Image (cartoon, grey):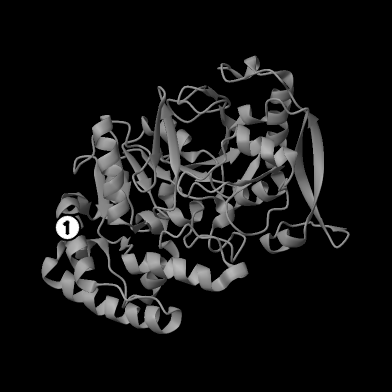
Amino acid sequence: MESRNVTVIGLQWGDEGKGKIVDALARLSKYVVRFCGGANAGHTINVAGEKYALHLIPSGILHPDVRNVVGNGVVFDPQAALGEIDELRPRGVAIGPENLFISQSANVVMPYHKLADSLSESLLGGGKIGTTGRGIGPCYADKASRSTAIRVGELTKGDTLGAKIRKIVELKNKMFVSVYGADPLDPDAIVEQYIGFARRLTPMICDTGSMLRAGIEAGEPILFEGAQGSMLDVDHGTYPFVTSSSVSACGVASGAGVPPSAVGRVVGVIKSYTSRVGAGPFPTEQDNETGHYLREQGEEYGTTTGRARRCGWFDAFAVRYTADLSGVDKLALSSLDVLTGLKEVKICTAYRVGGKMVEQFNPDLMPSAQCIYETLPGWTEQITTSRSFGELPSQARAYVNRLEELLARPVGFISVGPERNECIVHNMQIEGVGQ
């Protein structure tokens, strides 16, 4: 029996518009599952003029009948999650044990993770990675270290939680004081704070992997929601300028606690141009008027950090690599409207390194890559009111068609504006959506 599940991932460096695509598909799903990353994610959904910025809460939360799951592969920040919940509830978004489920096996982001993040970045100086400062990397490091890790399920064990936190803080303080010359953290204050978090979160903590496997057995549709973008994947991205988890479709099974066969159909989200936050190689970057135009038209400032994003042309050579990596079936193209007003648009189709054409994409070659561009005519007509492919200007249609050819996959969605309804369904055969 063919799986009814769908996995949505980003194919660039994040900020591709995954939240909008997940929101569009969520109504067809019983579960929406975050399987990677943490509060460093920023998924934005615009509904009827209302803007919702989600970081840890899955993007299915705006659909009343959807069960939203934070999987075991996520590093969970209780303070950030409760902050989101407290912002969403007054806006009429129902969140509680009936629709939000947090894996007992997810690892907990602690204050010492955030402090370690900021201190290590400041020590690196010009060699910094460009983290969000949310403690994501240090938390994943403790997950691998095991002895200094705390899992979400331990928050419910008040009799042992305090003692474990105090022991870990004692170890961390030795490093903060001796290595960084920083002030030590107060373990008692941290214990009190996290016991308070636990009181509120305990009703939502459960064995999410078991729940999802039961859903698979029952044939209930599941949507797996990726965070960040595939070029930031810890194994397959532009290492070391990457995030700390497996953010491609390769990470779904481990990060959600389901069999690989549950991944289902994979939708890869791409932006009509490219953006990147922080340090690292970016061959198609336009540090010029074009880059400025894309940044301002696309409002390219981080949902999580507020940092200005670096912007450049679409890199088809890199995206073909990430699409192949995750076995992408369909593409979802976002921000096509941002290109409106440009006289011409460019697509990178290949790299040249050391005067030679690169036959096989390799992220390690990106710092020295020279882009080979293909130039297409731009368009001036506003497209935010277009609701069918045929309503787009011929130049915009040609751009979409060329991306399909270069990436060897059909574009199923085309976003022509930030609002939920500013979207064209095109070449989409997922049950209940489009043609």
Along the viewing direction, whichever of 198 and 429 lies nearer the viewer: 198
At horizontal 34% and vertical 78% (from top left) the residue drawn is 172
Left or right of 251: which side holds 86? left
Place of residue 104 in the rendered image (x, y in percent of width and height, measured from the top left): 25, 59
Residue 278 position (above or below residue 375): below
Query: Could you tell me which secondary element the residue under label 1 belongs to?
Result: helix
Place of residue 68 in the rendered image (x, y in percent of width and height, measured from the top left): 30, 42
Name the residue beneath numbered marker 1. 196
Place of residue 389 in the rendered image (x, y in percent of width and height, measured from the top left): 62, 20
Where residue 268 sits, quadrant-wise, is top right
Q: Residue furthest right?
A: 355
Left or right of 187: which side holds 271? right
At horizontal 81% and vertical 43% (from top left) the residue drawn is 373
Where residue 384 sits, quadrant-wise, is top right
At horizontal 69% and vertical 24% (from top left) the residue drawn is 397
Q: Amino acid at mark 1?
A: Gly
**Image quadrant occupied by the N terminus:** top left
Place of residue 70 in the rendered image (x, y in percent of width and height, measured from the top left): 32, 50
Along the viewing direction, whichever of 82 and 346 lies nearer the viewer: 82
Residue 185 position (above or below residue 302): below
Along the viewing direction, whichever of 230 and 286 lies nearer the viewer: 286
Question: Can residue 54 be seen by looking at this rendering?
Answer: yes
